[in-house]
Image (cartoon, helix red, strand yellow):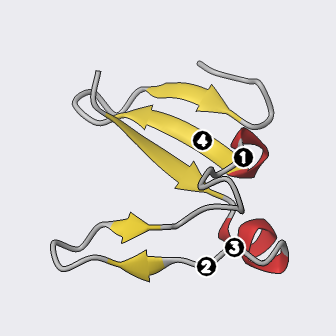
Amino acid sequence: TDAVVIVNLGAALSAGLRFFVSQNGVVLTPGNNNGLLSTSFFARIVDRMTGEEIFTASGEVD
């Protein structure tokens, strides 16, 4: 499944993470000291093809 991860950008920036836009328009991050973006910053995950929410931070999915 192709998915889009919607990040709580405010929380991630407050935690010191950096983001940039690649040449093809994708927003990327080098992550933390281990090169990872913690799932605690995930707001939602959406199926790219159907638009269906796969995950929400609140735990509620239709």
- Find numbered disc 4 in the image and state the secondary structure of the residue it sits on: strand
Residue name at image x 73 percent, y 52 percent: 41
The residue singled out by tag 2 in the image is 18
Q: Nearer the viewer, mark 4 or mark 1?
A: 1
**Nearest to the observer: residue 35 or residue 49:** 35
- Real-space Cα separation, disc 4 to disc 2, in angstroms: 19 Å
Graded by Cα atoms within 10 Å as few (under 14), some (14 to 19) or many (20 or more), the crowding at tag 2 reads some
Graded by Cα atoms within 10 Å as few (under 14), some (14 to 19) or many (20 or more), the crowding at tag 1 reads few
- Find numbered disc 1 in the image and state the secondary structure of the residue it sits on: loop
Is tag 4's residue or tag 1's residue first in the polypeptide sequence? 1
Q: Are marks 3 and 2 in contact (CB under 8 Å)?
A: yes
The residue singled out by tag 4 in the image is 44
Is tag 4's residue or tag 2's residue first in the polypeptide sequence? 2
Question: x and y percent of residue 8 in the render?
Answer: 69, 61
Question: x and y percent of residue 59 in the render?
Answer: 77, 25
Residue name at image x 62 percent, y 50 percent: 36
Question: x and y percent of residue 58 in the render?
Answer: 80, 34
- What's the amino acid at mark 1? Ser
| Left or right relative to 8: residue 18 | left
The residue singled out by tag 3 in the image is 17
Q: Are marks 2 and 1 in contact (CB under 8 Å)?
A: no
Is tag 2's residue or tag 1's residue first in the polypeptide sequence? 2
The residue singled out by tag 1 in the image is 38
- Real-space Cα separation, disc 4 to disc 1, in angstroms: 13 Å
